[in-house]
Amino acid sequence: MQIETVAGRSSADFTVQLAPDSLLAQLQDRLSTQKRFTVVEASQAGLRLNARPNLATWGGRIELRFVPMGSTSTLVQGRWTPALPTTVGIWGQGARDLRALEALAQP
């Protein structure tokens, strides 16, 4: 997965070998046990999450969009933005969160 971070905003695309509805169910199940992330909104089109603050950042807002790629795989477009809009330096937190979500999304 290639992650691009510009001015405190991170983005990455990755593919998961699950259909969007299966991916949504799996992520909701796995995220329910995570302390770092809170699901704000969930639909077949994707997820909106909040990431809790830590020593590196004031937290973040994450959007995962699901793009079906055939019947058995999904392209996930992830975007991480800081909770505090004026934040420029995030010390790599957006990339770490997107990598963690990619790991949770894998079957």
Image (tube, helix red, strand yellow):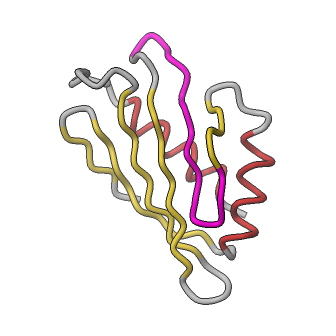
Q: Is residue 31 left or right of residue 61?
A: right
Residue pictured at 54% horizontal, 67% vertical: 66
* Image coords of residue 69 (percent x, y): 54, 83
Position of the C terminus, as image quadrant, is bottom right
Queried whether the magenta region covers residue 54, the answer comes back as yes
> What is the residue that sits farthest to the bottom in this orientation?
70
Where is residue 22, by image quadrant? bottom right
Residue sitting farthest toward the top: 55
- Look at the image and give the residue range highlighted in magenta: 42-56
> Does 6 sit left or right of 76 as displayed?
left
Residue shown at the point (70%, 64%) measured from the top left: 23
Dividing the image into 4 quarters, which one contains the N terminus?
Answer: bottom left
**Which picture quadrant has residue 46?**
bottom right
Residue 2: x, y in percent?
34, 57
- The location of residue 79, given as percent across then percent down, is 39, 48
Q: Is residue 86 above or below residue 98?
A: above
User: Residue at left 26%, top 21%?
Assistant: 87
Q: Is residue 50 above or below residue 44?
A: above
The residue closer to the viewer here, 27 or 42, is 42
- Marker count (numbered): 0
